[in-house]
Image (spheres, helix red, strand yellow):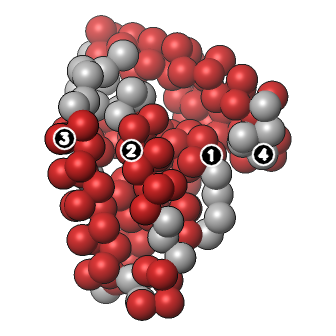
Amino acid sequence: MTESVSQQQLHVLLTGYLSIAKSEMSDDTLAKIQPELLQKYLGLVSAAIPLNHLIDKPLIQHALHSLVDGSSVEETIMHVFMLHIFKLTQDGSGHPLERGIIKQNIMSLLPIFENAKDKKLIRDDSFSKNADALLHIAEQTTDMNDIMTALQKEYYRHAAVES
């Protein structure tokens, strides 16, 4: 799905994520970050999201907060992937080919997320909510605009806290 990410690139990502965490989180919150979980997250998410998108600050913030809040690595990946799809859709041209690529990305990863749910790595309620939103975006249903509005608020949620 994405280009292969080297161990060196993952190390640079890990360093960047930890730097952002250190600059934006309290010492108490920072202490909750488990580097081995963050490392596992980066190793897995880099297979679903291109490297150039993994350095997107709001996505980094969501990943860090999700892991600190106790979400599983797999659940964090699904949430960040959904926000990644939101950003691709929001910034995109809407060209049918581009929309087809976004739909293909969604449809190729949903079964993997469902498998993680079946293995109890993603909570049922979290999977259902996120999968439903992704399907509406993939199919461009009439609910897509409401979902995009909600995702826009979610995408920028941590940025609003910093201001």
Q: Using the image as rendered, state which of residue 123 and residue 130 is in the foreground.
A: 123
Taking 118 as reference, is 76 above or below it?
A: below
Identified by mark 4, the residue type is Arg
User: What's the residue at 44%, 19% (across, down)?
Assistant: 105
Q: Secondary structure at mark 3?
A: helix
Identified by mark 3, the residue type is Gln
> Which dot, 2 or 4, sits closer to the camera?
2
Q: Which residue is mark 3?
A: 9
Q: Earlier in the sequence, mark 4 or mark 3?
A: 3
Mark 1 neighbour density, 10 Å: few (under 14) some (14–19) many (20 or more): many
Identified by mark 2, the residue type is Leu
Task: Point out which mark residue 42 bears.
Answer: 2
| Left/right of residue 42 with respect to residue 7 in the rendered view | right
Task: Point out which mark residue 116 bears.
Answer: none
Q: Secondary structure at mark 4?
A: loop
Q: Earlier in the sequence, mark 3 or mark 1?
A: 3
Residue ranking furthest to the bottom: 27
Q: How far apart are labels 2 and 1 at the CA level?
A: 13 Å
Task: Point out which mark residue 123 bears.
Answer: 4
Q: Which residue is mark 1?
A: 75
User: What's the residue at 52%, 42% (across, down)?
Assistant: 77
Mark 2 neighbour density, 10 Å: few (under 14) some (14–19) many (20 or more): many
Q: Earlier in the sequence, mark 4 or mark 1?
A: 1
Q: Using the image as rendered, state which of residue 131 and residue 122 is in the foreground.
A: 122
Residue 120 in sight = yes
Mark 3 neighbour density, 10 Å: few (under 14) some (14–19) many (20 or more): few
Q: Where residue 90 sits: x, y (%)?
A: 33, 40
> Which dot, 3 or 1, sits closer to the camera?
3
Q: Secondary structure at mark 1?
A: helix
